[in-house]
Amino acid sequence: MSDETGPLVLVVEDEPQMRRLLRASLGSHGFRLLEAGTTADALRLVTSAHPDIVLLDLGLPDGDGLELARQLREWTLVPIVVVSARGREDDKVAALDAGADDYLTKPFGVNELLARMRVALRHAERARSHEPAPVLTFGGLTIDRTRREVTLDGAPVHLTPIEYRLLLLLAEHAGRVLTHRQILKEVWGPAQQNQTHYVRVHMAELRKKIEAEPARPKLLLTEPGVGYRLRDEPPKAGPS
C-alpha cells in the first residue's frame, strides 16, 4: 500500500503496460503516483499538482519528451528522470542537456530506478535549501568548501585549481550524471564546450589522486560517451 504522505511521482508514459509496472513497483515503496499519457496532460499535472519528481518517456503521441523537459526547465526545478527505450549515447546527452537529472534505458531494474529517484530527490532538496553544505562527505572523501581542502581517509589530497573545481562540481551534483558539455561550461567556461579532451585528461589525473584503483573507479564513475557522475550511494556488496 502506498504512503499517503510519500513523494508524489508524475509518470509520463503512453504505454499502459509500463504504467502498470511503475504503478505497482513505486506504490509498494511508498510513492504516490499521477499518470499522464501525453505532453499536454503532463504540463497540466505539473502545473496543478506540483509533483516531487517526474519520470519521463521520450516517445509520446503528441510530442517529444525532450521538448517537454526543456519547457519544464524554463520554470521549474522538479527532478526529471528520463525512462526511455532510446539507448543511444546521443539520446542520453540530448536529454541531460535539455534539463533531465538522469536517464535510464528500458528495460531497467526497479532497484536501479529507485536509487536514481532517491538521488534526484535528494539533489532537489539540497537545491531548495539554497545554502550548500560547507563540508561534503562521500565515504572517506571529504571536501571542505570553506577551506578549499580535500582529504581522503583523513590525509590531505593536493589538487590543482581545475581538479578542485571539477571534483566540487561533481560533488555538488552527486549521483547525477553530468555531460561533457555541462562540465566544460561550468569548469572551463562556455567558450570551451567542445573541448571534451579537457575533461578526460583532468578526470584521469583526479582519479589517480582519489581512487584506490584509478582504472577501476568506485567513486568517480564514467557514463560512456555521455559524461561522469560522482557516486552518491555506496556500491552494493556481492553479485548484482
Image: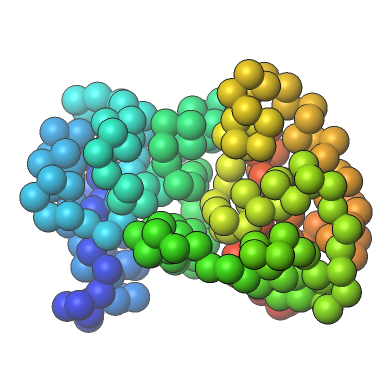
Q: How many marks on residues?
A: 0
> As displayed, is residue 185 above or below residue 102?
above
What residue sits 63% from the left and 19% below the top? 191
Q: Nearer the viewer, residue 145 or 155?
A: 145
> As displayed, is residue 132 above or below residue 180?
below
Q: Nearer the viewer, residue 63 or 227?
A: 227
What x and y, as percent, mark residue 74? 28, 33
Q: Which quarter of the figure is the C terminus placed in?
A: bottom right
Q: Is residue 143 left or right of residue 51?
A: right
| Residue 162 location, quadrant | top right
Q: Is residue 201 visible?
A: yes
What x and y, as percent, mark residue 143? 70, 66
What residue sits 68% from the left and 31% below the top? 188
Q: Nearer the viewer, residue 109 or 102?
A: 102
> As displayed, is residue 212 above or below residue 99?
below
Which scheme is used to colour this image of the protein? rainbow
What residue sits 71% from the left and 46% below the top? 166
Q: Which quarter of the figure is the N terminus placed in?
A: bottom left
| Residue 122 location, quadrant | bottom left
Q: Nearer the viewer, residue 156 or 176?
A: 156
What x and y, as percent, mark residue 62? 19, 25
What x and y, as percent, mark residue 206? 83, 50
Q: Is residue 59 visible?
A: no
What residue sits 25% from the left and 74% below the top? 6
Q: Is residue 149 left or right of residue 57?
A: right
